[in-house]
């Protein structure tokens, strides 16, 4: 009897141990597009090796749970409040996170944040070879060193109110100089869920990569209200494969889109491909007898809810003025004929704007929905 009780106690303890240590990964569902894999990456975060509140391996676990494919650890070079407590070596946080990332099949990229007053403000360098060598007096020399190491360099939070009290991002001569010399390859259009529409203009004017990053300092999940918001900022990367090299290739070729809080910002061609490849619906012609209403059932397989507003109503047809294609759900899209006595087969175009997909600074993306209608006269039939 005693033996049984002991066995039972051991079993309960084992189960308890198992439950405590199991983790779940939840990925934000998005379709692969144009022959590329759609990867979710966060290229900006902190650990106790600068002013973050967590040990580097914890960042890898958090990222895995949040369904990310890759992260870059980017501790500050010049701001290390915990240097009394932790022996600072600039490559160390990456090494620790990388070891845990390897166990989780999570790609971990070495990086650092060159932390200066504006201009040039805070600049991240990722794909570094040796972060220790960035500890230099002049920011210019630090950027040059990062470039010499083959880093991908980007301008962080250009509208951060601490450095830009009016919240307006500015492209200073210092940035222009870096950019001209191939030392500024990207810019955060979103940081910590804050979107800077102006930055999207820079993307249009220059060949520069758009990024969206968490810049997380606290443990993930404590700074945000809900689980959904936890995934609030990451960069969607269209990579040839799920490797470090392929992510770098995508960044070098501007194949990214910013994601935050049910929004996307970036090139219309990528936004459109994501949108259209998220949907499934029957494309067979819709027969409308007289002023009949029918429904197209649109299934949205992605985890983004698309908010549509009509801009041009097609002739002889009534379609919804506003409709949300809810994430992971099927929505009824109504089509009503406004005419009684026509016999005609026709391709109809309904023009909408997707309010939460920004192909232009702060502006929703236009999209044409096409469907085939067969009007049948009520009199004849
Ligand atoms: Zn910063
Ligand atoms: Zn930062």
Image (spheres, rainbow, N blue to C red):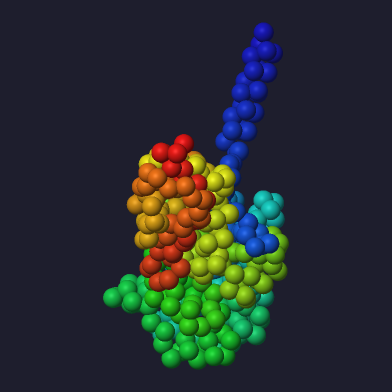
Q: Position of residue 249 (x, y in %)?
A: 67, 72
Position above or below: 11 against 86: above
Image quadrant holding the N terminus, namely top right
Q: Residue at x 44, y 64 (%)?
A: 365
Kindly give the residue lying farthest to the top in the view shown.
1
Position above or below: 36 against 104: below
Position above or below: 203 against 306: below
In this orientation, which residue lies closer to the viewer: 179 or 78? 179
Q: Residue at x 60, y 76 (%)?
A: 152
Q: Residue at x 62, y 60 (%)?
A: 33
Is residue 49 something one can see in this rendering? Answer: no
Q: For residue 92, which quarter of the picture?
A: bottom right
Position above or below: 151 against 269: below
In this orientation, which residue lies closer to the viewer: 41 or 216? 41
In this orientation, which residue lies closer to the viewer: 238 or 380? 380
Kindly give the residue lying farthest to the front in the view shown.
380
Q: Position of residue 224 (x, y in %)?
A: 40, 51
Left or right? Give the position of 221 relative to 167. Answer: right
Task: Report the number of numbered marks.
Answer: 0
In this orientation, which residue lies closer to the viewer: 238 or 73? 238
Q: Position of residue 284 (x, y in %)?
A: 57, 45
Q: For residue 162, which quarter of the picture?
A: bottom left
Q: Position of residue 175 (x, y in %)?
A: 47, 86
Left or right? Give the position of 15 relative to 193. Answer: right
Q: Residue at x 60, y 38 (%)?
A: 22
């Amino acid at each position: 009897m005693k033996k049984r009780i002991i066995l039972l106690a051991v079993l309960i303890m084992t189960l308890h141990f198992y439950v405590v240590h199991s983790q779940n990964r939840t990925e934000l569902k998005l379709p692969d597009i144009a022959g590329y894999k759609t990867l979710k990456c966060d290229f900006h975060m902190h650990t106790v090796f600068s002013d973050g509140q967590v040990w580097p391996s914890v960042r890898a676990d958090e990222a895995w749970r949040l369904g990310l494919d890759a992260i870059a650890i980017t501790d500050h070079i010049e701001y290390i409040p915990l240097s009394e407590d932790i022996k600072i070596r600039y490559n160390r946080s990456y090494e620790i996170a990388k070891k845990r990332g390897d166990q989780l099949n999570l790609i971990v990229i070495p990086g650092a944040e060159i932390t200066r007053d504006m201009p040039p403000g805070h600049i991240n360098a990722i794909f570094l070879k040796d972060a220790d060598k960035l500890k230099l007096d002049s920011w210019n020399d630090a950027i040059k060193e990062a470039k010499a190491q083959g880093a991908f360099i980007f301008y962080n939070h250009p509208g951060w109110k601490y450095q830009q009290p009016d919240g307006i991002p500015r492209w200073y001569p210092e940035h222009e100089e870096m950019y001209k010399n191939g030392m500024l390859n990207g810019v955060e259009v979103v940081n910590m869920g804050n979107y800077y529409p102006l930055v999207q203009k820079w993307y249009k004017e220059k060949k520069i990569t758009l990024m969206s990053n968490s810049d997380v300092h606290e443990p993930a999940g404590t700074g945000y209200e809900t689980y959904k918001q936890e995934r609030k900022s990451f960069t969607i990367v269209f990579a040839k494969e799920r490797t470090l090299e392929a992510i770098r290739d995508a960044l070098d070729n501007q194949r990214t889109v910013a994601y935050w809080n049910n929004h996307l910002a970036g090139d219309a061609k990528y936004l459109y491909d994501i949108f259209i490849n998220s949907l499934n619906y029957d494309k067979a012609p819709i027969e409308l007898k007289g002023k009949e209403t029918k429904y197209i059932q649109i299934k949205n397989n992605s985890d983004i809810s698309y908010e549509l507003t009509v801009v041009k109503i097609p002739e002889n047809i009534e379609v919804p003025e506003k409709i949300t294609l809810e994430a992971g759900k099927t929505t009824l899209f109504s089509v009503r004929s406004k005419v009684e006595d026509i016999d005609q087969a026709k391709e109809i175009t309904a023009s909408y704007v997707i309010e939460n997909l920004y192909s232009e600074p702060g502006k929703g993306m236009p999209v044409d929905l096409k469907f085939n209608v067969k009007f049948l006269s009520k009199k004849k039939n």
